[in-house]
Amino acid sequence: MAVMTPLDLAQLYFNLDTYIFTPDEIAKPDYPLAVGWRKLRVAKYRLTESTWAETFWREISKRLPQMVDVRVKTVEGYTEDALLTPKDLEQHFKSPFRGKGTPEEAQIAIQLVYRYHKTHMPPEVFVQQPGFIGLDCNGFVGTYIQRVVHKQKWREAKQKAWKWGGAGTYIETLFRGTVKSEGGREITDLESMKSEDTYVLALCDRDNGTISDPDGHGHYGHVMITEPNSMFPLVSSNTTGALPSLSVLSVPNRGTTGIFLRVVQASGPVGTGVLHDDYYTLHSPSRKANGTVFELSKGTRSGGRGTPVRVARLPA
């Protein structure tokens, strides 16, 4: 079976299979609510914890039995029915309200709200509200590392078994783990990049290469991930500004001025930001005190100042 790519994972959030149970008696809505499976789009950018998490949980937790049955469609593609204690359920429920939920946890958050809370709008409308659930940048990249690279199941305890990675892990730790893991390494030149590989791009300081992380004063850093088999070298002979041919994947060489590649990311601002993908050019590597800094520019521009990032190859 083909390995799930970052864009494949993003599609699970864009078309989230979610099971709606029959609401508890006290939670029956005043509008017709269809039960069963439905597809919902959960792609809002969610940075820091939503105040709705505690508000919902205080109400929902009072109505839960000792063991709660949930039904999810897993990343692996099968339906799973599970029994969870309220204590275990709380962690899974709250993660998407912090921008850190796996697809399974996003399903659980929606499922419990519509089962144990009296709602006033259908799920399709509710998931589009800016204060509800969503993803932040390391929430998405960390989830990919956890669920695809590590092949960990959604019910496994977060952090305890992880050597590196995870939706709640700081960006510098995600990057360092990528570099130090078997098969992963930091990239120092364009020529060593391969189209079939996946790369983690971490925002960094342009002058010294320090990777940005939350500083407690409103700065949060940023991390992105590339889609494999979407890389196209730009060469110095291409002076027309035309897009490279997307029909041929070629290996970068010494004439390469930049790498045109597809980037998947969850980015802000909160309320209007979404999980999305687009093409960028990676160019102008420069060795700094703490690592090699590349410029990342939108489109095919391979000169001048872009966004400073460090690059690491993700192990297969």
Image: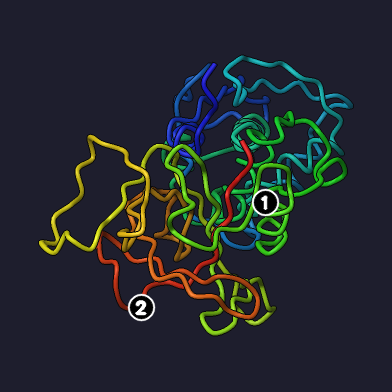
For image coordinates 60% across by 40% down, the residue present is: 144
Quick one: SS at disc 1? helix
For image coordinates 65% across by 61% down, the residue present is: 171
- Furthest-front residue in this view: 254
Q: Earlier in the sequence, mark 2 or mark 1?
A: 1
**What crowding class fits label 2: few (fewer than 14 Cα within 10 Å), some (14-19), or many (20 or more)?**
some
Residue 116, how many percent across, how many down?
68, 33
Q: Along the line of sight, which residue is nearer the eye, 232 or 27?
A: 232
Quick one: SS at disc 2? loop
Q: Look at the image and tell me whether residue 54 can be seen.
A: no
Pointer 1 residue: 178
Q: Is residue 85 above or below residue 258?
A: above
Q: Along the line of sight, which residue is nearer the eye, 55 or 283?
A: 283
Q: Are marks 2 and 1 in contact (CB under 8 Å)?
A: no
Residue 237, how many percent across, how many down?
17, 60
Which amino acid type is marked by label 2? Arg
Which amino acid type is marked by label 1? Thr
Q: Residue 105 appears in which quarter of the rendering?
A: top right
Residue 61, how many percent across, how many down?
79, 40
Tally the marks: 2
For image coordinates 39% across by 60% down, the residue present is: 272
Q: Residue 71 appears in which quarter of the rendering?
A: top right
Pointer 2 residue: 305
Indicate left or right for 219 with 307 as reference: right
Indicate left or right for 185 with 31 as reference: right
Quadrant (top left/top right/bottom left/bottom right) for the N terminus: top right
